[in-house]
Amino acid sequence: HSSEQYSSTSTLSSYKSGSTGRISQDMLEQSNFQPDGLQSLSSRSASMISESTMGFFDSHCHLDILFQNEQFGGTYSEYMVKHRQDYPDSFKGCIAVFCKPFTFAKVSMWQKLLAHEKVWGAFGVHPKNAKEYNRKIENYLISALNHPKVKALGEIGLDYSDR
């Protein structure tokens, strides 16, 4: 993801990665997320998404990068108020993916984001940042993965993109 992609609307539209993932049952129950069938979200219009009983759940966003690019230091609740036009009423939550090793040490930053009732986390070292991986980063990563709202290890793996 290039940094130009992360604007105030990115949480809900600009950087949809098309990633798939499993959403745990406790996340669904906590967010009152009720699936209404197998119809793909990509086949629905934006107005249908906001009116849907299924709701909208962003399975892959980078709130840390978004906040950094916008130089926003508030809470996610404050961010949602500031950008309320970007959040449909049907917004049920998101998985914030932390993939830059230097952010792992910013414990208060990511804990503040995960404190929001609609935010869960995933941590991993993106392949493009593999050179930054060391024992200290690993210790921060292990600590983060033990947080109760962290539900996944990722972004990890092989990156064949030309970016």
Image (spheres, rainbow, N blue to C red):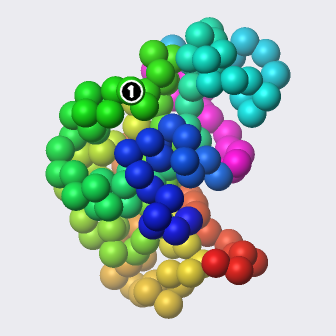
Of residues 159 and 156, the one nearer the viewer is: 159
Q: Position of residue 147 (x, y in %)?
A: 37, 49
Work out whether residue 153 can be spotted: yes
Rendered image quadrant of residue 87? top left
Rendered image quadrant of residue 28? top right
Q: Amino acid at mark 1?
A: Gln
Q: Position of residue 140 (x, y in %)?
A: 34, 69
Judged from the image, the secondary structure of the residue bearing numbered disc 1 is: helix
Query: Total label count?
Result: 1
Q: Find the magenta span and give its range.
A: 18-30
Q: Measuring 72% from the left and 12% from the top, which residue is drawn there?
A: 36
Rendered view: 53 above or below 100: above
Residue 35 is covered by the magenta coloring: no
Q: Measuring 17% from the left and 51% from the top, which residue is drawn there?
A: 73
Q: Position of residue 90 (x, y in %)?
A: 51, 17
Image quarter of the N terminus: bottom right
CA neighbours of label 1 inside 10 A, class few (<14), some (14 to 19), many (20+): few
Q: Measuring 47% from the left and 21% from the top, which residue is drawn there?
A: 88
Q: Measuring 56% from the left and 81% from the top, which residue is drawn there?
A: 128
Q: Which residue in the structure is indicated by mark 1?
A: 85
Horizontal placement of 77 versus 8: left or right? left
Of residues 81 and 22, the one nearer the viewer is: 81
Q: Position of residue 160 (x, y in %)?
A: 75, 78
Of residues 139 and 63, the one nearer the viewer is: 63
